[in-house]
Image (cartoon, grey):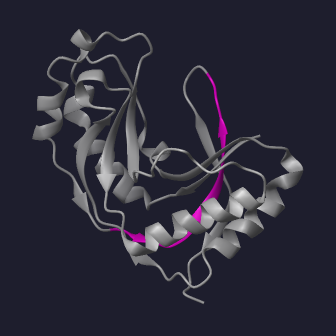
Amino acid sequence: MRLFVAINLPDDVRQSMWNSAAPLRGQSFPVKWVGPDSLHLTVKFLGDVAEQRVNELSEGIDRAIVGTAPFELPISGFGAFPNPRRARVVWIGCEYVAALQRIQQNVEAEMEGAGFPCESRSFHAHFTVGRVRRDTRPAALGGLAEQLQRLHFESQPVVESVDLMQSELSRSGARYTRLHAATLSGL
């Protein structure tokens, strides 16, 4: 099973995020766009994991969120990794607020204890809205930076859970299934 830990938002927020990226989808950029149902914030990618470990990992996520109450997540701004001229990922950003920072660090520690190496890159909280096709030349992304600057999205949804997700890859794209929801309560 291909697994990751994520924060999912309410359907109406994800739909609004997707709608705000519509001008990009109307351009001829060589990007595979993520549908509204697939928008999420990845806290930790785990990769291929044996199915019998789902309960163990779910318990680790439960421990990672202890003491964290539901919190508002300020979301705004569009960008691209590593940058718009050589983009691989197009995203909507979010603020790395204290509650998200605590969750991310605790999840990282719990998953390291379960045998998953710590991420070597620094964490950059974002929602992927599109992935640039492999072997794309920079010239094909001409105008992307300007388009990203013109877009606007702003929201402060309440995060209520941290989820263990399964990703199933296919030619039509990834399909995500929530395997476990660790509900934030502050206790």
The residue most toward the front is 120
Q: Residue at x 21, y 52 (%)?
A: 153
Q: Residue 99 at what x, y percent from top left?
A: 44, 74
The answer to whether 45 appears left or right of 80 in the picture is right
Instruction: Name the main secondary structure of what is drawn in magenta.
Output: strand
Identify which residue, 96 or 18, lies in the foreground: 96
Q: Residue at x 30, y 22 (%)?
A: 86
Placement of the C terminus among the 4 image quadrants = bottom right
Q: Residue 30 at what x, y percent from top left?
A: 33, 16
The answer to whether 130 appears left or right of 66 in the picture is left
Q: Residue at x 31, y 62 (%)?
A: 95
Identify which residue, 112 or 52, lies in the foreground: 112
User: Disc count in the image?
Assistant: 0
Is residue 24 shown above or below 127? Answer: above
Q: Residue 132 at what x, y percent from top left?
A: 38, 22
Range drawn in magenta: 157-170
180 is within the stretch colored magenta = no
